[in-house]
Amino acid sequence: MPSTPDAPRIAVDRVLCTGHGVCAQTLPGAIVLDEWGYPIIRREGVDAGDAALAVKLCPARALYLR
């Protein structure tokens, strides 16, 4: 999905993140994991429902929407 002005933008708090990788499983096109298992945001604009689910499922509460 291309990023649109009103699409939710996903972000990660790198201090809170503990590298579980749930975000990459929930948003596979938007988030990939680095070699240590920490997320790299490839695409900030994501589907609102998918973004809300990813934020809800993050065990470290490190994902948020901006």
Image (cartoon, rainbow, N blue to C red):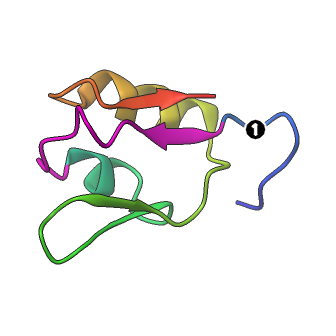
Q: Residue at (68%, 49%) from the top-left corner?
A: 45
Q: Position of residue 9 (x, y in %)?
A: 64, 39
Q: Is residue 7 left or right of residue 20?
A: right
Residue 50 appears left or right of 61: right
Q: Residue at x 12, y 69 (%)?
A: 36
* Helix, strand or loop for the magenta stretch, by majority: loop
Question: Residue 9 or 17: which is nearer the viewer?
Answer: 17
Expressed as whole percent of the image width and height from the top left, the position of residue 26 reads 33, 48
Q: Could you tell me which secondary element the residue under label 1 belongs to?
A: loop
Q: Nearer the viewer, residue 7 or 15?
A: 15
Residue 46 within the segment the image draws in magenta: no
Tell me the quarter of the image containing the C terminus. top right
Q: Quadrant of the N terminus?
A: bottom right
Indicate left or right for 36 with 24 as reference. left
Highlighted magenta segment, given as a residue range: 9-21
**Dot 1 amino acid type:** Ala
Q: Residue at x 22, y 40 (%)?
A: 17
In the image, residue 55 sits, relative to residue 44, either above or below, namely above
| Quadrant housing residue 63 | top left
**Residue at 23% across, 31% down:** 16
Crowdedness near tag 1: few (<14), some (14–19) or many (≥20) residues, C-alpha within 10 Å: some
* Residue 13 located left or right of residue 35: right
Instruction: Return the residue found at the far bottom.
Output: 35
**Whole-percent x, y for residue 11 in the image:** 50, 41
Say which of 19 and 55 sits in front. Answer: 19
Relative to 22, does residue 54 appear above or below in the rendering? above
Q: Which residue is mark 1?
A: 7
Q: Residue 38: x and y, percent?
A: 22, 59
**Quadrant of the image occupied by residue 6:** top right
**Outermost residue toward the right in this view:** 5
